[in-house]
Image: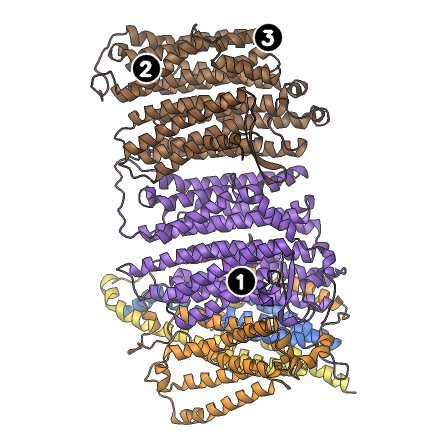
Amino acid sequence: MPKTRNRHKRLDGFQRLFLLLVVCLITLLGCILSTIPNSAPGLADAVARLQERSGVKSPVTAVLLNFRAYDTMLEVVVLLLAVIGSWSLTKSPLPEQDTDISPVQMGVVRLLAPVMCLVAAYLVWQGSHLAGGAFQGGAILGAAGVLILVSDFPWIRTIPALPLRIGLVLGPLFFVGIALCCLFFTGKLLGYPEGTAGWLILLIEAACALSIGITLASLFAGGRPDNTMKKIQPPAKHPPGKSL
Amino acid sequence: MIFLNVDNPSWMITPIIVPLTAGLLCFLFQRKTFAIALSAVLVNLLAACFLIGQLLTCGPMRYSMGGWQAPLGITLRTDGPAVLMLLMTGVTGFAITLYARGYFSFRIDDPGGTDRHQQQQRYFWPLWLLLLAGLNGLFLSNDIFNLYITLEIIGISAASLAALSGKPAARLASFRYLLSSLLGSLTFLLGIVFLYKSCGLLDLDLLRNLTENGPGVRAALALMSVGLLLKTALVPMHFWLPPAHANALAPVSAILSALVIKGSFYLLFRLWFEVFASSITTEALNVMGGLGAGAILWGAIQAMRQHRLKLMVAYSTVSQLGYLFVAFPLSRAADNAQVWSIVIFMAMAHACAKSAMFMSAGTIFLHFGHDRIQDLTGVRASLPITVLAYGIAGVTLMGLPPSGAFIAKWLLLSWALASCQWWWVLVIIAGSAMAMIYVFRVISRFIVIPEGFSSQKLEFHSRLLEWPALALALISLLLGLVAPWLLHILAKGSIDLTQILPGGLP
Amino acid sequence: MITTLLYSMTGLILFGMGLFTLIVHSHPLRKILAVNVMSTGVFLILIATAYTPLGQGEVDPVPHAMVLTGIVVSVSVTALALILACRVQETSNLDLLKKKTVPETAKESTT
Amino acid sequence: MNWEQLLLVSILLSSLIPGIIIFGLPEERHRLRTILNLCGAVVKISLIVIMDIGIYLGHTFEIRMPLIPGVELLLNGDPLSALFATLSSVLWLLTTIYAVGYLEDSPNRSHFFGYFSLCVTVTIGIALAGNLVTFLLFYEMLTLTTYPLVIHRGTDKSLRAGRNYLIYAFSGGAVFLIAVIWLQNVVGPVDFSATGFSPGFTDSHGTVLALIFVLLILGIGVKAALVPLHGWLPQAMVAPAPVSALLHAVAVVKAGAFGIVRIVLDVYGAQNLLLLGVLPLLGGIATITILYGSLRALQQDNLKRLLAFSTISQVSYIALGMSLVDQPLAVIGGLVHLVHQGLMKITLFFCAGNLAETLGIHHISKMNGVARRMPLTMAAFTIGALGMIGIPPTVGFVSKWYLGLGSLAAGNWWLLGILAISSLLNGCYFLPILIRAWFGKQQESWPEELYVGRFETRLMLLLPPLITAFTVMAAGAVANAQISPLAWVRFIVREYGL
Amino acid sequence: MIYPILTLFDILLALTLLWLGWHLLSTEDIFKAVVLFISFGLLMALTWVRMRAPDVALAEAALGAGLTGPLFLSALRRMNRVLKGERRLDSDENRGEDHAKNPKPT
């Protein structure tokens, strides 16, 4: 389609102007960025100094789940919010039952999914001293969930909503719960008691990884579970809203 | 119980943790959600009051998360503006919660209603409570990256809420809103990157104590400001606001217009007048003021031209936001606490008035099935309290005494005259005059009952739909009368620069 | 130092490209892609800032944590935006397609 | 809180509370509504009389409520506010009685009476305001509360009138606001006091203060209907008769005039104004307004419009008196006209309302021989009209006498001439009406005869104008007595030390 | 000695990133753009490793390529399906009417 391509490529006046603007802006920012002296100390030293007290060996995990655990707590909530938002938007448009999945794929998925779960568990565990942690583990879990969803196992449709919700909320709720327990015992929100930091972080990470996995899979599913679904409605037939 | 002491800073986390937990529980249980939500907003309101009391007795406080001190750990802090914003959120949020209950039960009880309303209510509560937690987190946070995350929480939940109504227009508006908000957050994040590269710090108090303000810091501030302006919908970056606010469900519109926008504005203001106050130039302040003036005029003109009530109210938000920015250039004539006082008055009055207006508009929409201004004659006969609430809120928008907006405008005009900047006076007065026109264009329709008009007898009548709006409108009107008390809190809560020591690891 | 600069500039240019595409193009998926590219650009600058060559000390872990957080946030927002975009498409296409299909069917009737 | 402050608050509440209750009452509870209204009015009058006595005996009535530094709400009962408050409350009582009769069986009465009560509360607030901020507060609220009354009929015409009213009033309010803030910036917070601000400012900021004075007068002149800011007033005549009576005689126009008095006497003070040299300006505007209003009134056929233009003309006597602020006699004349004009004008409006309500007469040309059908009403009207012309022993004569004496004392012969011309013009437009009504022959049947009964019209419509007309005569006849408006105004002028 | 090689590698990597980024943003075909985006994500993972950020690299590999890609693809499929389904449904419904109403096409 050369014609459309041409039309596409040609920029109108506004676009040219905007391009110019963006180029200028980026150049300006680039100049500024290059002139910033690299003298800022950063927080590396602080992390290194406090590493021992964090209960984990990996500095990134220490920052994520101890020094700045509050950020992570809120961020797990962000993930959950995305799911709530997507559930509020639409039902899950799972593919039609009649799409045929090759048995090879089914077999591979059956084999791969448990392995991925294992990998995820390993990543979570490894997070305390090497690269890895809740997010990575959760991401692998989520990928496993995506595989299962794509292969369209019949039991996916029958997952009741409540356990799914429990799985989704588990991570954030557990995080908040631990935080409040810490508040109770040490007087500081998320201030882990002496010596328990490592274990608590591992627990939190495990719960969060599970939740993140489920969250990502639910996001892939693209909507709330529809347990009453006998016949699958194509989303287009969904009546458009009438009022407000 | 040592942590139950009044002077324990741990109380600060209540307004964040309680709505957060309640939101999670609401999502988990999906039954008795109103009870959970109501108790959460009630606790939130009480916590805000308690924090004010704490501020008055013990002064500003800082709280280090997990006991990790500033450069590395995340700190929260209370000061005058923050607790007042919490109070604003608490009061408005409480009323909105009650209203939302009335709104949803009205629609669910409607015989023509479908399952859709049930679904909307089910997802409204967790989204709203998490949004509330995000807002409170924003007001209290003292760490710039943490602020980014709270902004994201607010942005995502607000966009989801805006799409809740299920109308195609609402979804489209919500998509635009989400993208704009994302663009805003990303620009803000780029600013954080510049800041971290230049200073290596994330804590606002420590950043404030840095005397160095090289080009890096300036660029960071500019980027963060642009991001926040996009989220605050200052003209000309307001394009996403009117459709998103006007097409949402009425309680959602109230939340978006009253609270969400104030969050990003508060942050912007804090950055400009507290953290980077030393790098601000007069030109930059004038640019902001100019944009604010543009917003006042443009928003008001658009509001006057609208045919739909909710769109009109949404454009009036655009206009009212301008006043907050006109305060920028005039700040040179006043000291810091005064600038805060004007912004706080304006924000609080606008939050209460605008949510009351959206609630009234929503109630009218529910009962009449449309919100075309032309056809809303004689609404007073069927919904007197709603119309009263709308009228009182309108009076606040016009900035008549004794509303909080009047106090704010008084201060603005006073500074403008004191520093001989005539043009601001003209803009402010013109904005108020146009506000008068667009408010009264509607009110005169509402209250006139032409001869031979038979008022519709309404079958459903929910008190929850009418009284919260009236209460908020009255609060906004009488805000000026409690002005000394608010000023007292602001004065008490301004952080003394010398109190904050740099560094300080445990 | 030069590495940091190189990657920072790359990140900045990615940001700019994303910004341009986000504003200029109208397709929702492309807009979401553009936002993703933008966020990647920002993360790249941040990580490049923290970078210190091997043997010259520890890498600052705080930006890494920030980027991790940011990536997760961006994934979740992307997912939400995609679903929203689908819903927009589903409802808005009704009108759009009806306009389109008239000439199509007309063509069929003439042939 | 001592009893004086309590009294001030209860004066305001005595009409606010009935108003709020009335809003909540269902439409058909008219008996309860009437009782509430009348009780409120009577209570208010008695409270205000107590305050008057207190002020006379030298008590101070004052409530302060600081808002922000430099801005505070201040309610203050001084002799001047007592004058206005007493006038308003007495006329409110009469107007309420009249309105009950007037609006019998018409729809939306709870709405009407609710705003009516609020309106009076606000007017009393204006009377009691102790500084410019408080004055401004009530001044803006007055616009808000009278607006629903103006558009009460709901016709397109009334909506248009309402819109114009709002635009005029709020523009005036905005100018006034700017002027107030500017003034505060220059001289600091100003309370209403007998001397005004310190004369030192006049030397240092003369031009600015003069400009601010002009702005203040412009802002307030909208409500006082000074030419050329009078456009809203004749249009607002579409409102029901009690509203017109209230707007013209008690609330809005009078509030504007009262504001001028406050600004001249209390904010600037005679001394400052003389130094600034802006008084001739005020006098000039007042003169133009007096003549213009009278001339326009001459051309009217619609009775209410004629009365409206007559109001424009008459209210400016007050401004005229104020422009001669250095002459105690002129000040007395102006101040006492505040009361006298209210009494006379409300009588006229009551009568015009009676004509319209009983016989459907809106135009002068239809009034031939109406006095034979409604002798009492027309008698009251005649007294009011003669008062307007200034024929003794009515109160109108008293005001004009003092104004004339004041202008003579100031050596302004031309002002005396203006007064004479104005009286002549008043005669020109009122006397033909009187002649037509008393001696004209009824040519055709009345436009629509709405009421036939024992009296010439409903008793509740008849009594108020009779009472006010009697007062017009009595207060003029006993002007020199111990208790009369004139006596109180003399007391005020003594207090100001003029 | 290792320095120039690394720099060369860096430049190559950066240029590839930019090239990929530009292409994925400007290509006509959305599907192609998504595929390019996935490869872009993988390349980013490589960059993170280069920047000594293994945690981020892992997350990027798993999230950026492993999840965002499928998310985009499924959204694309959903949109296309809607488009097709809509068209089929639409034309089915309208064909008869169009024949009846608009015998003369413009």
Secondary structure, mark 3, is loop
Tell me if C25 is positioned left or right of D274 in this view: left
Q: Chain B is drawn in which colour?
A: purple
Q: Mark 2 points at which residue?
A: D364
User: Which of the pair D487/D177 is nearer the observer?
Assistant: D487
Q: How crowded is mark 3: few (under 14 residues within 10 Å), some or many (20 or more)?
A: few
User: Which of the pair E85/D119 is nearer the observer?
Assistant: D119
Q: Name the residue under label 1.
A: B15
Q: Is residue D230 visible?
A: no
Q: Percent from the top left, x then y, of residue E93? A: 26, 69
Q: How crowded is mark 1: few (under 14 residues within 10 Å), some or many (20 or more)?
A: many
The amino acid type, in three-letter code, at marker 2 is Ile
User: Which of the pair C91/A183 is nearer the observer?
Assistant: A183
Q: Percent from the top left, x then y, of residue D357? A: 28, 22
The amino acid type, in three-letter code, at marker 3 is Asn
Q: Chain A is drawn in which colour?
A: orange
Q: Is residue B50 visible?
A: yes
Secondary structure, mark 1, is helix
Q: In which quarter of the image is the C terminus of chain B?
A: bottom right
The amino acid type, in three-letter code, at marker 1 is Pro
Gap between marks 1 and 2, in whole Å?
A: 71 Å
* Chain shown in brown: D
Secondary structure, mark 2, is helix
